[in-house]
């Protein structure tokens, strides 16, 4: 009995009193987050004209939005920028915020997958040389099928997944981490 009480107390101490305890997403005070809202990259992504996860147009150039995302990601307070972006941006900007949160706050990312996976909201999505207007966010959040990439964690890569699964073609989504991975990859190429 004494051992059980000590175990419970240790558990409560270790899980309940940690300074680094993650705040559940719905309890974050977004108004209290202090960022430079005049930052060019933040403003650009807040009103992003489209969401893309790789090269666009016939030339396959990486869009400015992905480079802006990469510059925000390098900031010491990048998490604050992505929290604020998720709370204030248009739908396209919110998707860029999700990509940042995949890497910076993976625990709350799962909560956001449920939130965005059940939305009927639409975005302008650019894939290659095609721009889709009114594309459903929930279709980008989670795809189904055998060829959908499911990364092990936010350190895994699409290339590793392809090798593990002996695939040459694949589908991507936010849920499996492949869209955030591709944004990260292209932001720094």
Image: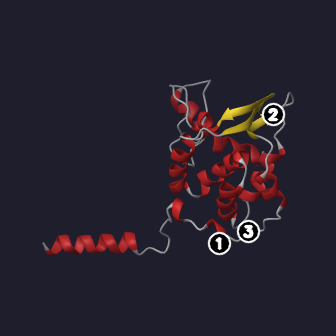
Q: Give the mark nearest the N terminus, 1 or 2.
A: 1
Q: How many marks?
A: 3
Image-quadrant location for residue 81: bottom right
Residue placed at 64% from the left, 60% from the top? 83
Against 164, residue 31 (above or below) is below
In what quadrant of the picture does the C terminus appear?
A: top right
Does the residue at mark 2 contact the one at mark 3 (Cβ under 8 Å)?
no
Colouring scheme applied when the structure was drawn: secondary structure
> What crowding class fits label 1: few (fewer than 14 Cα within 10 Å), some (14-19), or many (20 or more)?
few
Residue placed at 69% from the left, 67% from the top? 77
Q: Is residue 95 left or right of residue 15?
A: right
Q: Is residue 96 left or right of residue 22?
A: right
Q: CA distance from mark 3 to mark 1?
A: 10 Å
> What crowding class fits label 3: few (fewer than 14 Cα within 10 Å), some (14-19), or many (20 or more)?
few
Residue denoted by label 1: 32
Residue placed at 52% from the left, 29% from the top? 144
Residue denoted by label 2: 56
- At numbered mark 1, what does the secondary structure look like: helix, strand or loop? helix
Q: Is residue 90 left or right of residue 104?
A: right
Label number found at residue 10: none
Q: Nearer the viewer, mark 1 or mark 2?
A: 1
Q: Position of residue 45 (x, y in %)?
A: 77, 52
Q: Position of residue 160 (x, y in %)?
A: 58, 37
Q: Give the mark nearest the N terminus, 2 or 3.
A: 3
Residue denoted by label 3: 35
Q: CA distance from mark 2 to mark 3?
A: 30 Å
Q: Is residue 175 visible?
A: no
């Amino acid at each position: 009995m004494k051992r059980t009480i000590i175990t419970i107390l240790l558990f409560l101490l270790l899980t309940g009193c940690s300074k680094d305890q993650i705040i559940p997403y719905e309890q974050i005070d977004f108004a209290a987050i202090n960022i430079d809202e005049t930052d060019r990259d933040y403003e650009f992504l807040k009103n992003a004209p489209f969401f893309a996860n790789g090269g666009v147009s016939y030339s396959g150039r990486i869009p400015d939005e992905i480079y802006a995302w990469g510059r925000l990601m390098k900031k010491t307070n990048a998490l604050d920028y992505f929290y604020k972006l998720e709370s204030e941006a248009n739908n396209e900007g919110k998707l860029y915020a999700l990509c940042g949160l995949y890497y910076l706050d993976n625990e709350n990312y799962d909560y956001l997958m449920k939130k965005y996976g059940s939305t009927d909201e639409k975005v302008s999505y650019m894939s290659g040389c095609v721009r889709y207007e009114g594309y459903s966010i929930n279709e980008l959040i989670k795809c189904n099928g055998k060829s959908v990439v499911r990364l092990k964690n936010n350190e895994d890569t699409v290339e590793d997944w392809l090798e593990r699964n002996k695939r040459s073609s694949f589908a991507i989504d936010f849920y499996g981490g492949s869209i955030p991975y591709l944004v990260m990859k292209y932001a720094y190429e």
